[in-house]
Every structure is written in structure tokens, then in C-alpha cells.
Image: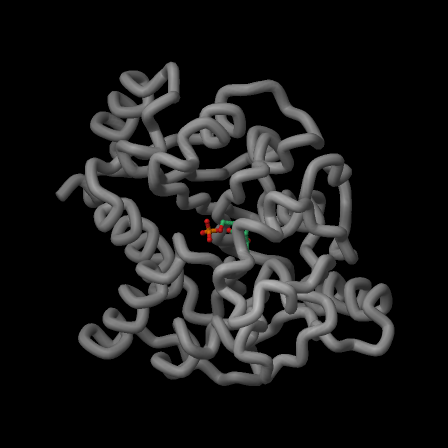
Amino acid sequence: MEVIIQNKTEDACHLTARLIADAIRIKPNLVLGLATGRTMEAVYGMLAKMHQEEGLDFSRVITFNLDEYIGLEPEDPCSYRTYMNEQLFNHININMANTHLPLGNAEDPDAECAAYDKKIADAGGIDLQLLGIGRTGHIGFNEPLSALRSRTRCKALTPGTIEQNAPLFDDPKRIPRRAMTMGVGTILESKRCLMLVTNAEKADILAKAVEGPITSMISATAMQLHEHCTVIVDEEAAANLEQKEYYNWVFANEPEWEKYQD
Ligand code: F6R
């Protein structure tokens, strides 16, 4: 795991977008794992701008989102499908047939989850997975006690997550109690992971995720097991990290990061 601390939230989002764009330029048919949530909105705005102004080409990119609410139709204004269309897909030249999210209103959600893992495998696995972290420490919707080897499946949301996401619903009572989510094991199979964490409200959970013991109570700690996970944070989110100086030294001195110093 490596941790990159950027002074401003905007810089952390920009570095994340640049790393995704570089991965697409290297492999135009990249299999890209995507996340939703407020943190990612700026990243998607930047990627859309890179498409419009620099010609970043998404025509062969294949995407798999981490999760979707159970019970919502794709067309629901609060579904993650709608979020992705509005935040990113409608602004780039992606082939919509290559964009995947679990189907929230599937008749058989368990079968839908199993089919989702198969689709990922059939695409050759995820090359680059973008991740955020919830206040409960979840990645995707892997709430406390998610098995570290779990696959895509249905998961009950915690009251904390429901409260965190309720403002995004016109009627907070409409927020589903369950979601389909890639499992921790599914996420760990991605070839590379980029975790973006910003704002002071995430400082406590980020320190636990990066520097605390690995536990299924905080699924983000599982990323310590991943061979190539880069955690990008702003100063506020980094506030409680003990080894900040070391992380800054690595970023400033490792040749891999030289071109991202500006
Ligand atoms: C959603 C997802 C979640 C979010 C997390 C943070 O697809 O993967 O794990 O990344 O809940 O959400 P925000 O960015 O809204 O704080």
C-alpha cells in the first residue's frame, strides 16, 4: 500500500483522475472498476473534461461499478446507474453496452450477484478499481463483518450508512435498506486499486483503514492485503495518520511518482 497526501482536495481528485487517464492511455480497453458517492463527483468531472479537451478516449473502456441499491430501477433518479450516467457516462464517448452495474430491480438478486462476478471474470478481471471509503469503513457496500473473501452479494446497510446517504434521496424514507455489492474478495482480485479519501470527517476511519489491524469490521483494512493499492488523500483526511512524513518522503523520492509532482 502507498499513501499520497495532497494539500488540497482538488489536487487529490486531480491526481486520481490523472492516474485513471494514464491507465486508459496505456491500455485503451481498460477494465475499470468505478465507485459512486460525493467524493468521486469531482474526479468524474475532471475525466469528462479530459475527454472533451484532450480527447481522452473511452470508446473501448469497459466499466464495472461496485454496487447498486436493491429495489431501485436503473431509471430511478437515486439509482447508482443514474448517478453514473449523469456524473460521467453521458459526458464521454463510452459505449453504454460496456458499462455495468448490478441490476437493482433484478427478480433474483442472488443470481444477479453471481452473474455479475462472472461478467467481471469474462472481461478478464478488473485492471484498475477506484474506491472510496464510507464512515463505517466500508468499501463498496461491504459493511462491518463482510468476509474478507466475500464475493458480489446482497448486503444489509448499517443505520450509519443509511443516514449518510439519505440526503441524496428526495424522500429519505425511500432509501433502500439493502444493496448488491462487489465482495471484498472480488475487489482484492483487481490488478490495481486507487482509493480516494477526502475531508476531515474521514480522518479517523482512514487512519484505522491504513494503519490499524486488518479486520472484517472495517472492510477497507483489507486493502492492506492488496499488492498494488494507492491511497490518495487530502491534508484533512490525512490528519490522524502516524506515518505521514514517511509517506510524503516516498512520494517525493520514488521515481514512479516524479511526473506527478507538479
Ligand atoms: C459507493 C461506494 C462507497 C462510497 C463511500 C463514500 O459506490 O463505493 O463505498 O465510496 O460510501 O461515499 P462518499 O464519497 O459519499 O463519502
Q: Report x, y in % for residue 230.
A: 42, 39
Q: Report x, y in % for residue 218.
A: 63, 32
Total marks in image: 0
Decide if residue 69 is on the left or right side of residue 129: right
Decide if residue 201 is on the left or right side of residue 161: left
Evaluate whether residue 84 shows in this view: yes
Q: Report x, y in % for residue 129.
A: 52, 53
Q: Residue at x 21, y 42 (%)?
A: 8
Q: How is the image coloured?
A: one colour
Near-viewer residue (108 or 157): 157
Evaluate whether residue 68 shows in this view: no
Near-viewer residue (26 or 245): 245
Q: Residue at x 50, y 38 (%)?
A: 228
Decide if residue 114 is on the left or right side of residue 41: right
Look at the picture and state if 201 lies above or below 113: above
Near-viewer residue (262 or 215): 215
Look at the picture and state if 189 lies above or below 31: above
Quarter assignment of residue 153: bottom right
Near-viewer residue (71 or 63): 71
Q: Which image quarter holds the C terminus?
A: top left
Q: Report x, y in % for residue 29.
A: 48, 70
Q: Residue at x 85, y 68 (%)?
A: 111
Q: Residue at x 25, y 33 (%)?
A: 255
